[in-house]
Amino acid sequence: MSRTSHRRRWPGDALWAWLCAGCVALSLFMLATLLTLLTVKGLGHFWPATLEELTLRSGEQMIGQPLREAPMPTGSATERLYFTGNRELTGADWRWVGVDEIVSAATPADVIRLERSPWGDFIGRLIALELDGERLTGDSAFDRISQLLALPPSERSGELVLLSPSGRGLVQPLSGVNTFVAPNALSIGEKTAIWGQGVWRFLSEGPRAANTGGGVWPAIFGTLLMVILMSVIVTPFGVLAAVYLNEIAHQNRLTRLVRIGVRNLAGVPSIVYGVFGLGVFVYGVGGSLDQWFFDDALPSPTFGTGGLLWASLTLALLTLPVVIVATEEGLARIPDAQREGAVALGATRLEMLTRIVLPMATPAMLTGVILAVARAAGEVAPLMLVGVAKLAPQMPLDAEFPYLHLERKFMHLGYHLFDSAFHGDDVEAAIPLVYATALLLVLIVLVLNLTAIFLRHYLRRQRGES
Amino acid sequence: MADASLAYRYPLAPFYDVVMTPPSPAPSSLRTLKDRIATGLITAAGIGVLLAILAIGVFLVWETLPLLTHFDTLSLEKLSPLAWGTLKAAIAALVLAVPVALGAAIFSALFMTDRLRARIKPSLELMEAVPGVVIGFVAGLVLAPWVERHLASTLALLLWLPLSAGLAGILWHLAPKALRRALSLESAGLWLLPWIAATAALVLWAAPILEQQWLGSDLATFLDRRFGIDYTTRNTLIVGLAMGFAIIPSVYSLAEDALYDIPKPLMEGAQALGASRWQALWKVALPMAGPGIFSAVMIGAGRAVGETMIVLMASSNAALMSASPFEGLRSFSAAIAIELPEAPPDSQTYHLLILAALVLFLFTFLVNTLAEVVRQRLRRRYQRLGGA
Amino acid sequence: MNAPLNAAPPVVTFPAEQRCLNVEAFSLAYGHKPALKALTLEVPRHRVTAFIGPSGCGKSSLLRAFNRLHDLNENAVHQGRIQLEGDDIHAPNLNVSELRRRVGMVFQSPNPFPMSIYENVAFGLRLERRLPKRQRDDIIEWALSAAALWDEVKDQLHRSAWQLSGGQQQRLVIARTLAVKPEVLLLDEPASALDPISTLKIEELIRNLKNELTLILVTHNMQQAARVSDYTAFLHSGELVEYGPTDQVFTNPQRPRTENYITGRVI
């Protein structure tokens, strides 16, 4: 009966429900689109793409990797963007070609692509490998090249004789070659292996060629180091502050106000923390440290400029509310009966805290710290003020005394992403790696958040049993 | 199991005296001392942390004091476009995000089954974790050029998406019973996904054709030629879309909590009196949860005003005073990120930028406090009603 | 209702050598809310004394005062004196930890710590001194036996205490308290959250333990008070209405209010 009456009120009644359902679907759709985009573009970049050899209407020959199509500004024709490489010969890595200009397209197996150190990618054909006066061609040349590339660059000898698509020959020393593939000749298995190598290189190597090649290892390392330092600072202080607020301070109006204040600091924009870090840590404390201990280096600042220590401190302050709030929530969940039980057995407050309360609140604290780390790993704005570098010449951790250089600038994944996407010389060339960096960053942050969610879930279940 | 009349098989008294010796008093006082010291340390650390947090406000005020001595019209001229940019970005984001977030909140709090809600809610909240720099990158380098080429499609999509959900509803009511049972309203949030993707694809296919037919060129060019409206690639619309994406989860999450926590008897009572689910929502749920929804929107506004990386990357960063959604903007936060590292300390720019930071700090702090107070009051109201 | 409230209540007294706890004009208030109003009573050694009365009458507050648990509430203020075996429990030089070891407390709902059964009982022992493991094991076995739990848990001492049933948990809490050898055991409605069989076990335990220590029991359950206690005190709105041997309080109450309460009439 209720069903029929429900139907009669249609459509003014149920239409709204559908709009609301649409909102849920739309939000999920956007999230899924974003993640799919990052995954496909970020991981797809390392897949050895098929190269097309084109004959244009003008009779010109060219080889390139097709990227995308767009309508011409006028008319209904479309044009296609190719990555052609060979910057030193043609002056550009990219070329737009009108689709109707193409007479024929083929994917010959002997086309090769190599990544070189001075000039970026080369796309063309291999004529021969010259090694100690020997001249190798065909498969023997390919085998030899892959052996030689396994050596470190300084120990390689030999030169490649290459033929560009337009028919010009050139000689490339093997020491400047990073990768060498003939993508059209590869099987799926080989392509997967090369893809795996590419991903590994991305994670383990430093950036090359103005962030358009290589990897992000220094940025991963810098982010990691900063986040660890930050956790070391924020965990004890956050926990102590929460314990003070929840276990020691008198629960009165002031405590409630302080609690609301702390909670709200989590909503204060991160850039404000950056301003505070710059004004107080860098200019204030850092400037004074320089005057007292490093005056021989002045006017070039040692601690009076952005660096690892100040960045960690700033982010520790930024994430302090997160840790305090999470820990307090954990402490508040512990039934007073547990505290009374311990006290009634003669435990002092310290013993009650260390033996009963803190162990019980550990998952909550851990949740807080993980959430803090997730926030810090993705936060870029304050770092722009207190200490990241485009390309740090020295790692902040090395074999040189005192090993951990707190004053040095460091690289950060998020800032690296921003910088190579917006301030690079060749943004178009950097974008595939930016996608990969973005994917990496999102993965790190999502995994951390998921861990926190599961921890919290576990915590609730454990409470439920008691 | 032992029976209730447990006799003592263990002689109690003798063992008791043999095993136990009275505790010696000395360690007790040591323990008390340790306890006093630890309490002192925790108190010191706790108060220290709270003072450090307080120091943020003090520092910002202190550093803006020099401006009082020579605050001139120049400062005002410099700050007002930034204030306008901040406001414009926040409004754009809220206009696009609040309807979606509230709609999603209503649906998942009142229509979804608890099991489904337990999965959907965390997934949507995960959106909040996506770093601003990633959203900014996608908005600035992927979305912005695409929207520039497909402006008509974008606007059509913004209009079409709500309509398509309504259309889905109409089709559903016309559909045979078996299909309706398979695709229930409760899980519509999920199975509408492919529907939205399909209809969106349809719009993307149709819009350029209609555009060419009616306008003769694409919409951006048409607007420029016909009305002289400039189109900047990275503009307010893009900022609104990107930041909208970023604030949907926080608004959704808080509003959903407020709606879900409404004591169940209230809603059931209204429905028992013959109100439909939607009438119950309008007459009972929204007035009850109103303060909670208000505080959710406030939190969203706070986040939109202070967000840095998205505005920095998705807007042109030109300090303009224009109201057009197709022109760029520059917000306080972006100005601080760009200019502060270059500004020498003690220069007027430095103090001005710190004033901007102070404004952001005060605004977000006040807004959040308001939201928190409202939320706590609401929670107490729910407790009263739920207990009754 | 006809007897004036401020008249001296009928109270049993004991010779000094039988007194374990001695309460003299003790008042307690939380902020501006008075909980106990100038109570005076004596608790005999090695007997079970029950405190009964309606909710909020102050019986739990009095019980918690013996253990100085009201210290945890920063709003609590008190006046008057409580003596344990002649020692003022509020004396400035008295060690609270030590007092609480002499006066053990068992709460309304079982509150085992989130650790193993063994560690729960060992908790109090580990606070004060380092005992050799052998001796500690002996005490734990003894305490669990005294609490009539040993047979049920002796093979699973390292299981989490939270996996025990409610009645077992409550007996574990009693064992935990016994392990530090208290002189007084305070029981705050120890069986109110338990099923009838577990309740019977706890009552049995109380009767057996009185040979070794002084027990004070707060209960809502009149039959329980009648079954296990030797003396019964009836409290109402923070005041002592009547205190005497249990038989007398239940069969021949001196005050009409006591009678009303015991027979279940509104007071």
Image: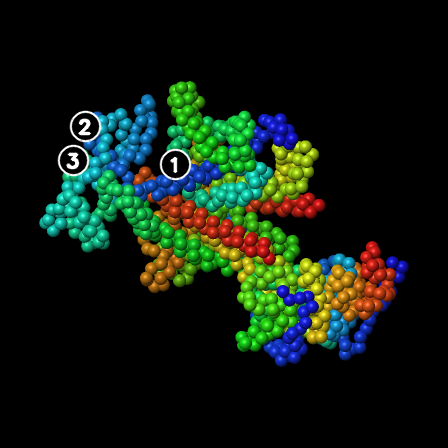
Residue type, numbered disc 3: Gly
Q: Check if mark 1 and mark 3 are on a common chain.
A: no
Which chain is home to disc 3? A
Tag of residue A167? 3
* Residue located 37% across and 45% down the image: A437
Tag of residue B142? 1
- Cα separation between marks 3 and 2: 13 Å
Q: Is residue A258 left or right of residue C60?
A: left
Label 1, secondary structure: give it: helix
Q: Is residue A423 visible?
A: no
Q: Check if mark 1 and mark 2 are on a common chain.
A: no
* Residue located 45% across and 44% down the image: B130
Which chain is home to disc 1? B
- Cα separation between marks 1 and 2: 34 Å
Residue occupied by mark 2: A59
Residue type, numbered disc 1: Val
